Image (spheres, rainbow, N blue to C red):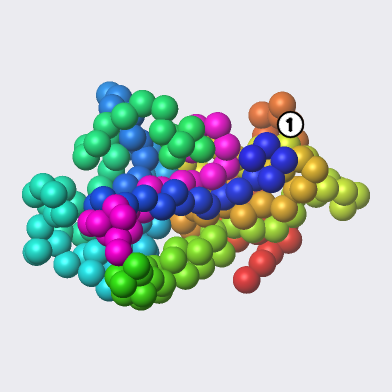
Amino acid sequence: MDKNPFVLGANLQGGEKLVSYPFDTARPLQETPDHAIFRWLAISYASAHLTMSETFRGGCHTQDMTNAMGIVQGAKWHPRAGSMNDFSYLHTNCLELSIYLGCDKFPHESELQQEWENNKESLLTFMEQVHRGIKGLVTDQQGEPIANATIVVGGINHNIRTGRPAVGITASRPAASSTTLGPPNATSCCRAPTGSASGRSWP
């Protein structure tokens, strides 16, 4: 993940039917700086699932913990330390969620087609979210790519970095008023409009 800076990820599990997002570790400040985008990503999956948001039926094994939305913050549902979701968020550029595909952890072969239909559109919708936010190349004044450059999105206290050696960036972040781009170890460099990098705009 150091050489290939993934920006969106999911681990697929069973035994429940919901989407869980960071933080998973119980801590005084449970919400991540990217709480809004994590909720958006979780909702994008749950709302496209054929039955995940039908929480009036109750949870798979216990009461509904998702407030009738099919999504829940990990620390409020099943707190645990050292999860992949938390690690990815704290130490990489990747926003990762846990997706629980259905109540049956080991569905029978005869049920697999229906499980696929339940989750197919959700998986496609979730993958499409990678195209949201800022994407492009961070370059210097000579047009050379800058590896390990810091990207600061205004209003979000969680910086990301361009990759090594690949320097393309895709930041799954909501629209912000400003974005600051800087070389390694620099406090600031330059500002770019929302949806662009190094002054070059993308649609």
* Residue 153 x/y as whole percent: 54, 45
Q: Is residue 38 left or right of residue 1?
A: left
Residue at 31% x, 55% y: name it: 106
Residue at 50% x, 51% y: name it: 9
Q: Nearer the viewer, residue 145 or 84?
A: 84
Question: Which residue is identified by label 1?
Answer: 184
* Residue 161 x/y as whole percent: 65, 40
Number of labels in the image equals 1
Residue at 13% x, 49% y: name it: 61
Image quadrant occupied by the N terminus: top right
Q: To which quarter of the image does residue 115 belong?
A: bottom left
Does the image show residue 154?
yes
Q: Is residue 188 left or right of residue 30?
A: right
* Residue 14 x/y as whole percent: 31, 52
What is the residue that sits farthest to the right in this orientation? 142
Q: From what the image shows, is residue 49 above or below residue 153?
A: below
Q: Which residues are magenta?
A: 89-108
* Residue 102 x/y as whole percent: 27, 59
Image quadrant occupied by the C terminus: bottom right
